[in-house]
Image: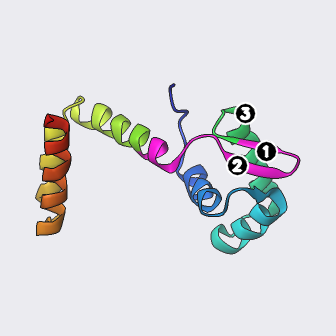
Amino acid sequence: MEIPKIFESEYRFCEILWENEPVTSSELVRLCSERLEWKKSTTYTVIRRLSERGVIKSEDTVVTSLISREDAQSAESAEVVERTFSGSLPSFIAAFARKKNLSKQEIDEIQRIIDNYKE
């Protein structure tokens, strides 16, 4: 299944949803007002758009996600690697590591991930 594109402001909305779901649309309006400083109409517009694209479901005023945070992150990461590094994950990791000092814990975790794929 192809994951629909989730734009930055929509992703911030989805983070609120993932933390609170299932949640009523009125509660989402309140949370988005507090955290994102959105108006009620903005929240309902985002709910409608994401529902139309199959990212979330709004049924009887209860909103739930149809796409997990992990799936959304994977799709976005894959798009960045494809667009920016011609699909080369090693090039992406090398570029990332040049700008960020990786801790021993992060290096060990990356190594565990690689080792799990080797098996």
Of helix, strand and loop, which one carries label 2? strand
Q: Is residue 89 above or below residue 93?
A: above
| Crowd rating for badge 3 (residues with CA inside 10 Å; few <14, some 14–19, many 20+) | few
Which residue is situated farthest in the right direction here?
A: 60
Check disc 2 and report the residue beneath it. 64
Q: Quadrant of the C terminus?
A: top left
Task: From the viewer's perspective, tell me whether residue 26 is left or right of residue 18.
Answer: right
Check disc 3 and report the residue beneath it. 52
Check disc 1 and report the residue beneath it. 58
Residue 20 in sight: yes
Of helix, strand and loop, which one carries label 3? helix
Q: Label 3 sits on what residue type?
A: Glu
Magenta residues, start to end? 57-73
Residue 99 in sight: no
Q: Label 1 sits on what residue type?
A: Ser
In the rendered image, residue 91, in percent from the top left (x then y), is placed at: 14, 40
Q: Label 1, label 3: how many angstroms apart (C-alpha)? A: 10 Å
In the rendered image, residue 113, in percent from the top left (x then y), is placed at: 20, 47
Point out the tag, 2 or 1, that comes first from the N-terminus: 1
In the rendered image, residue 47, in percent from the top left (x then y), is placed at: 74, 47
Q: Nearer the viewer, residue 41 or 60?
A: 60
Of helix, strand and loop, which one carries label 1? strand
Q: Label 3, label 2: how many angstroms apart (C-alpha)? A: 13 Å
In magenta segment, residue 69: yes
Q: Label 2, label 1: how many angstroms apart (C-alpha)? A: 7 Å
Q: Nearer the viewer, residue 7 or 111?
A: 111
